[in-house]
Amino acid sequence: MSGLAARFGLDALRQRWAAARSERENEVPIRDWSGSGGGQPPRIAGFDQTLVWLVIGLLALGLVMVYSASVALPDNPKFARYASTYFLTRHALFVGIAFVSALVVVQIPITVWEKSAPWIFVLSLLMLAVVLVPHVGKGVNGARRWIPLGPMSFQPSELAKLGIVMYAASYMVRKMEVKERFFQAVWPMAVSLAVIGLLLLAEPDMGAFIVIATIALGILFLGGVNGRMFFLSFAVLIGAFGLMIASSPWRRERILAFLNPWDPAYSQGKGYQLTHSLIAFGRGELTGQGLGGSVEKLHYLPEAHTDFLMAVIGEELGFIGVALVIVAFFWLTRRIFVIGRQAVMLDRVFAGLMVQGIGVWMGGQTLINLGVNLGALPTKGLTLPLLSYGGSAILMNLIALAIVVRVDIENRQLMRGGRA
């Protein structure tokens, strides 16, 4: 065999091939791909899958807890004509509609949203005005906040949150060169907020106005507005809220009830929800009473499936359940801000500010809802994002998060050398 190899020159060929291989390895010191991919480079995901699965998990938890919190409502004469699964069925329908809408929205390029931002803001203002028209807006418990649309009622204040996110981001991009001048940079935004505030307080819906004002201030701050102007704007808003509370006897009473909900003067009135929410958390202790084991949802805690769903979670799943929900929302908010910061670093300022505004919206509203449920903030009619019962809120939450996913997709395309 060795003679044949020498005859046909195979030994010399093997030696030249080995020498060439050794030379290539020395010239290109690139480490081979390793891992479970069979020697192939790892595939880069087109979007943040962990974020999407976390949102799906929160939606699933919301379905379970809305059913648990509302299953006993038909025992109340007010809901006697409803089946025990009425709110679960409607909430599942809302989630389905919102999920399909999110799948559509995630296909839309961010440039389309940037061009449409002022018009979406104007549309939200028009809808806030329309809801106040008699026989058009639907009134519930003395508030006129909904427009009936067939199987569901739409709440324009939810659209206004997305509208202010887009408008404020677009505004800061357009005013980037004059952001150090108060009247040119801040005053027009202040007028826009004043108009929204007047419309929302006419409903009345002070909770939504607080969230919208927080979003606007957050985007102004993240957009690089002068610090003195930012704190001046913040002080003006705090003064406006203080004036509204001082001039409204029922708002003043709500603040007093929040400060001492166990006072007999408030425990059966403005402090009733808060006292029973605190009782629910107290009963939950560390591990909770078990799924379905809440007593407070049995007509003691009003609106348990909407504004005070966290109290039911605390009673049934305990401190551990509440802590896990808080951690999930903290991670979600942080991840949204990371995606927004990546967009800004890629010179996509509108996309970055818009996503960070959505982060302020989700994180801020979650913080307010938790504070209300735990007695750290005065009672406000704000739902817990992704969890509480409510068609408009779920719809706009998923549309906003679909926009975040779209920005993430475009960021990854740009980082791989493609085009957004």
Image (cartoon, rainbow, N blue to C red):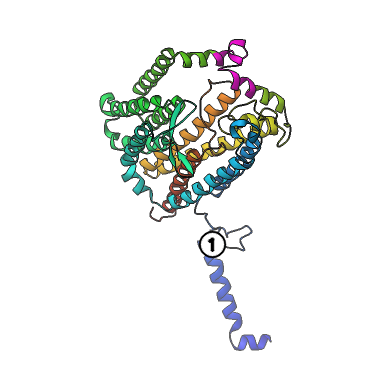
Residue 134 % position (x, y): 37, 31
Which residue does the image show at 67% across and 22% down from the upper left?
A: 279
The answer to whether residue 91 is left or right of residue 228 is right
Say which residue label 1 marks: 26
- Within the image, what quadrant is residue 324 found in? top right
Q: Of the residues shown, which amino acid type is indicated by label 1?
A: Asn
Q: Looking at the image, is 415 positioned above or below residue 314?
A: below
Which residue does the image show at 38% across and 55% down from the upper left?
A: 419
Q: Looking at the image, is 88 positioned above or below residue 321?
A: below
Magenta stretch contains residue 409: no
From this viewpoint, is residue 126 visible? Answer: yes
Magenta stretch, main secondary structure, is helix
Residue 351 % position (x, y): 39, 43
The answer to whether residue 292 is left or right of residue 115 is right
- Within the image, what quadrant is residue 124 found in? top left
Q: Give the range drawn in magenta.
A: 257-277
Magenta stretch contains residue 271: yes
Residue 27 % position (x, y): 50, 62
Q: Looking at the image, is 278 positioned above or below residue 159?
A: above
Tell which of 28 and 70 is nearer to you: 70
Tell which of 227 and 260 is nearer to you: 260
Which residue does the image show at 60% across and 42% down from the upper left?
A: 86
Residue 314 % position (x, y): 66, 30
